[in-house]
Image (cartoon, rainbow, N blue to C red):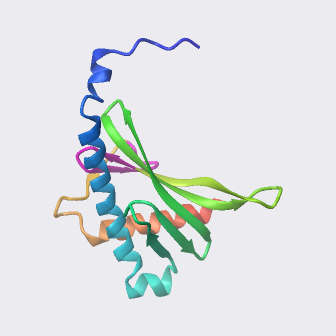
Amino acid sequence: MKDTPITKQQFDLVRSAVADAARIKDHVRNLAEQLRQVFSKDYPIANWGVRYDLDGDQISAALETPFGIARSRLVLGVDERGPMGRYLFERRNLAPDDSFVWGHAWSIRIGQYGEISLEGQEGSSVDLDHPYHGENLIAEIALSLLYAIARKF
């Protein structure tokens, strides 16, 4: 398959790669911290049973759930809408040779301005920094994440 030429409009999307990557990482850190806060409240601890431990970068995380172990990590890139990050959640699965492998469970797209789109809902996005979106939205994201981990085996 032959690649098509890269257009000026396309390469213009990466002109500010350093600043865009830093901005996206800041938005993901904010989201990760909000998830950590939700999972560390009494009700979610007692009922959902998720342990969400952020790594030193405050982006990557180790998750322990009643359905297995998972992790999160950020992959930066660009799509037709511009610079973006894909916050990936992967579940630890058992391979046929009894070794562990990481398999995709779910992802969240984060745009350079903080807008997020949940996997399966890419046509719509919300701005986490908007005051209208509060703890309920983060709780819905947290429960969606737990379900996504649970359904992958």
Q: Over which residues does the magenta segment extend?
A: 109-122
User: Is any part of residue 27 visible from this angle?
Assistant: yes
Q: In the orientation shown, which residue stands out farthest toward the front?
A: 56
Give 79 or 29, whichever is nearer the viewer: 29
Which quarter of the figure has residue 32? bottom left
- Residue 143: horizontal and vertical position, in percent? 45, 69
User: Is any part of residue 153 visible from this angle?
Assistant: no
- Taking the image as shown, residue 42 lies to the left or right of residue 95, namely left
Q: Residue at x 20, y 59 (%)?
A: 129
Q: Residue at x 30, y 48 (%)?
A: 24
The vertical placement of 23 against 78, above or below, is: below
The vertical placement of 51 against 1, above or below, is: below
Give 69 or 43, whichever is nearer the viewer: 69
Which quarter of the figure has residue 44? bottom left
- Residue 85: horizontal and vertical position, in percent? 38, 45
- Taking the image as shown, residue 43 lies to the left or right of residue 24, namely right
- Taking the image as shown, residue 69 lies to the left or right of residue 133, namely right
Give 114 or 152, whichever is nearer the viewer: 114
**Quadrant occupied by the N terminus:** top right
- Residue 106: horizontal and vertical position, in percent? 51, 54
Q: Residue at x 47, y 52 (%)?
A: 107
- Residue 12: horizontal and vertical position, in percent? 26, 24
The vertical placement of 56 against 76, above or below, is: below
Which quarter of the figure has residue 111? top left
**Quadrant occupied by the C terminus:** bottom right
Say if the magenta span includes residue 113.
Answer: yes
Give 133 or 71, whichever is nearer the viewer: 71
